[in-house]
């Protein structure tokens, strides 16, 4: 689903887990688009 796709997109090093930097980058990118994170 959409959440899985978003996770894969956010998991930039494909580690299967989001580190803090990846998560912050993902939030920064998605803030302009979806805006539902906060």
Image (cartoon, rainbow, N blue to C red):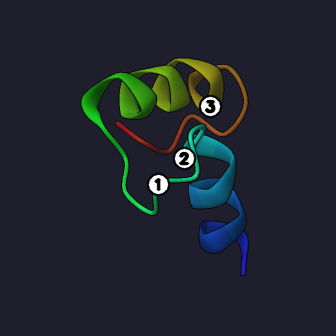
Q: Residues at badges 2 and 1 in contact (C-beta under 8 Å)?
A: yes
Residue 18 on image: x %, y %: 37, 47
Q: Which element carries disc 2, helix, strand or loop?
A: loop
Point 67% across, 19% down: residue: 32
Per the rendering, the mark at residue 11 is 2
Point 60% across, 38% down: residue: 12
- Tell me if mark 2 has few (under 14), some (14-19) or many (20+) residues whose alpha carbon lies within 10 angstroms of its own: some
Q: Which residue is mark 3?
A: 30
Q: Nearer the viewer, mark 2 or mark 1?
A: 1
Per the rendering, the mark at residue 15 is 1
Task: Determine which quarter of the picture holds residue 23.
Answer: top left
Apparent side of residue 5 relative to residue 10 in the rendered image (left or right): right
Q: Nearer the viewer, mark 2 or mark 3?
A: 2
- Tell me if mark 3 has few (under 14), some (14-19) or many (20+) residues whose alpha carbon lies within 10 angstroms of its own: some
State the separation of the CA atoms marked 2 and 1: 7 Å
Task: Determine which quarter of the picture holds residue 30.
Answer: top right
Residue 38 on image: x %, y %: 34, 36
Point 45% across, 63% down: residue: 16
Q: Nearer the viewer, mark 1 or mark 3?
A: 1
Q: Nearer the viewer, residue 36 or 20?
A: 20
Q: Which element carries disc 1, helix, strand or loop?
A: loop
Relative to 14, say whether 30 is above or below: above
Apparent side of residue 28 relative to residue 12 in the rendered image (left or right): left
Residue 11 on image: x %, y %: 54, 46
State the separation of the CA atoms marked 1 and 3: 20 Å
Quarter of the image where the N terminus is located:
bottom right
Q: Which element carries disc 3, helix, strand or loop?
A: helix
- Tell me if mark 1 has few (under 14), some (14-19) or many (20+) residues whose alpha carbon lies within 10 angstroms of its own: few
Q: Residues at badges 2 and 3 in contact (C-beta under 8 Å)?
A: no
Q: Which residue is the extreme one toward the left? A: 20
């Amino acid at each position: 689903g959409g959440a899985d796709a978003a996770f894969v997109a956010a998991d930039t090093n494909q580690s299967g887990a989001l580190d803090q930097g990846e998560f912050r980058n993902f939030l920064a990118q998605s803030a302009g688009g979806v805006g539902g994170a906060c």
